[in-house]
């Protein structure tokens, strides 16, 4: 039996410093030595494993099983959701219907400020909800360059526009992954994030217009910015609170696009804005005319995705896979007996509970997982859009090949998270941070912001720091869902300065080698946003606690 020791060196700050070393290694590997994500992950695992065994007294077999458990969780369900989502996107691309979907958005208005809102904010959020992991910024930035923006400007606007949906990106994976790591229902973290993000979602369209055309532009277009941001924020609040983390981005984006399209039939800005030579020159994308049937078909896979995910999140559907349910045969449980001998003790768990074992049963649900629901939509899409079976198989192979290093990175990052959690290192960091008292409520989202800056992923940040946030909240007597959600919400504004995200955006618009220029453009806004979120989190914790669902 291994009983976690949260202060092995007899000084909480010294012990916390040792627990922090793997995170420093990860930071230096990515930022200073500029290694690949999977290389940084591997080096971090090696350092964490050595410290877990030599400093925190973790038996070697339990350290290895902790890594294996985390890596498996990284593969299923996390990587499976990503693979299925990108496969669906690629099928629509191969069919040619994705181009129709894109151009149906461009055709809504000739005003290019509003086109930027529709593409950078609404369509970007839609793509974030469907595929995530850098794809939305790459696609929307390239589109905006075609609309007439100079490349650096287009990339910067897309990075800023991509903040609102990141917490629920790639079909809810950031929150689903965190929920599994901290053993808190995903719907609870989702609901808290759904209470924190709407003000930011409402603000972003106004801010984009301000960056393009100053207060003059805001004055001319505020009604449509209000419709876009307001409809997005309302649907985001409702879906995140009542349906869970899978649908807020997709549903909010679709509703926002529809609301803007309908609104613009009755209202247009008096001055139609187009980008002049000083901003980017003449637009190169011309919207083509398509039949209603083609437009409906182009949107149908993603409408179907919403319907299927709603079914997958319903209680009656989940009950089919319970031990006594008719689909229980599709759920496989693997018991890591060695992990069952790892005990958490006070102050991480209440004194009256004594020793509490960590989670040791790995659940492999073949059907009742979001990734499988997306695969089902992809298969239906294949027949609906008449994609040949051979093309679909080839596309699936391409998806696996393109994602292999991303999947490896996720497996390594999650493996590190579980070594850190199960050795007690995360708890040590939390206990030290709790010494800062109530001030940690302000720093909670900044921790998530740093995590996304390091990893380029809200999912990875949530896995790295989720347990730390949870345990610190318990130490301070604050509802744990607040700090868990704050980690994810703070992370969304870290995405615009993440080296990985910046590299993707620059590659998409042909600015490889000029990443530092894009960083300088976005960093000031990122810092302002995260300070605002920190103040908001502190206010919720101590002044307006009724905002916690």
Image: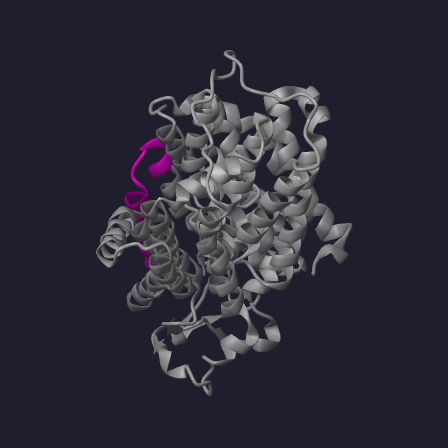
Instruction: Label the magenta part by its dominant secondary structure.
Output: helix
Which percent across, then down, holds residue 195? 67, 53
Q: Residue at x 45, y 66 (%)?
A: 4
Q: Is residue 342 above or below residue 539?
A: below
Which percent across, then down, holds residue 52? 36, 58
Can residue 362 be seen here? The reply is yes
Farthest residue in the top direction?
A: 278
Q: Residue at x 45, y 85 (%)?
A: 323
Decide which of 397, 535 is in the foreground and name it.
Answer: 397
Quadrant in the rendering for residue 366: bottom left
Which percent across, then down, holds residue 78? 39, 59
Quarter placement of the N terminus? bottom left
Decide which of 259, 540 is in the foreground and name it.
Answer: 259
Decide which of 148, 440 is in the foreground and name it.
Answer: 148
Task: Based on the picture, tell me whether residue 98 belongs to the magenta stretch.
Answer: no
Which residues are drawn in magenta? 28-54
């Amino acid at each position: 039996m291994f009983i976690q020791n949260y202060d092995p060196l007899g000084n909480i700050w010294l012990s916390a410093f040792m627990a922090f070393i793997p995170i420093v290694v990860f930071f230096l590997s990515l930022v200073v030595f500029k290694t690949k994500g999977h290389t940084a992950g591997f080096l971090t695992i090696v350092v964490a494993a050595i410290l877990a065994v030599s400093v925190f007294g973790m038996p070697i077999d339990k350290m290895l099983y902790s890594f294996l458990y985390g890596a498996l969780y990284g593969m299923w369900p996390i990587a499976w959701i990503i693979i299925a989502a990108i496969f669906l996107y690629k099928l629509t691309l191969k069919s040619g219907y994705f181009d129709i979907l894109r151009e149906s958005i461009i055709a809504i208005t000739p005003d290019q400020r509003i086109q930027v809102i529709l593409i950078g904010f609404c369509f970007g959020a839609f793509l974030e909800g469907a595929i995530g992991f850098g794809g939305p910024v790459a696609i929307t930035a390239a589109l905006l360059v075609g609309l007439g923006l100079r490349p650096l400007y287009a990339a910067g606007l897309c990075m800023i526009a991509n903040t609102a949906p990141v917490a629920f990106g790639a079909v809810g994976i950031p929150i689903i992954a965190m929920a599994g790591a901290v053993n808190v229902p995903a719907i609870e973290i989702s609901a808290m994030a759904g209470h924190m993000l709407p003000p930011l979602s409402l603000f972003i369209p106004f801010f984009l217009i301000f960056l393009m055309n100053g207060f003059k532009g805001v004055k001319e277009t505020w009604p449509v910015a209000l419709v876009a941001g307001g409809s997005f924020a309302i649907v985001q609040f409702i879906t995140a609170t009542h349906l869970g983390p899978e649908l807020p981005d997709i549903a909010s984006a679709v509703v926002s696009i529809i609301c803007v399209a309908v609104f613009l039939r009755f209202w247009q800005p008096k001055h139609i804005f187009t980008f002049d030579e000083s901003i980017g020159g003449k637009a190169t994308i011309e919207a083509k005319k398509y039949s209603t049937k083609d437009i409906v078909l182009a949107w149908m896979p993603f409408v179907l995705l919403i319907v299927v995910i709603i079914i997958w999140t319903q209680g009656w559907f989940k009950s089919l896979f319970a031990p006594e349910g008719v689909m229980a045969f599709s759920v496989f449980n693997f018991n890591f007996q060695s992990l069952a001998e790892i005990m958490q003790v006070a102050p991480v768990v209440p004194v009256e509970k004594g020793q509490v074992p960590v989670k040791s049963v790995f659940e492999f649900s073949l059907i009742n997982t979001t990734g499988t629901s997306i695969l089902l939509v992809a298969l239906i899409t294949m027949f609906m859009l008449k994609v040949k079976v051979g093309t679909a198989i080839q596309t699936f192979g391409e998806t696996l090949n393109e994602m292999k290093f991303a999947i490896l990175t996720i497996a390594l990052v999650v493996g590190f998270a579980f070594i850190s959690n199960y050795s007690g290192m995360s708890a040590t960091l939390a206990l030290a941070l709790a010494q800062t008292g109530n001030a940690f409520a302000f720093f909670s989202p900044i921790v998530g912001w740093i995590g996304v800056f390091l990893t380029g992923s809200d999912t990875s940040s949530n896995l790295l720091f989720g347990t730390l946030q949870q345990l610190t909240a318990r130490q301070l007597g604050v509802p744990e869902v607040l700090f868990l959600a704050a980690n994810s919400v703070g992370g969304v504004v870290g995405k615009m300065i993440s080296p990985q995200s910046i590299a993707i955006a620059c590659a998409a618009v042909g600015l490889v080698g000029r990443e530092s220029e894009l960083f300088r453009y976005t960093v000031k806004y990122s810092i302002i946003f995260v300070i605002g979120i920190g103040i908001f989190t502190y206010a919720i914790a101590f002044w307006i606690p009724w905002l916690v669902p």
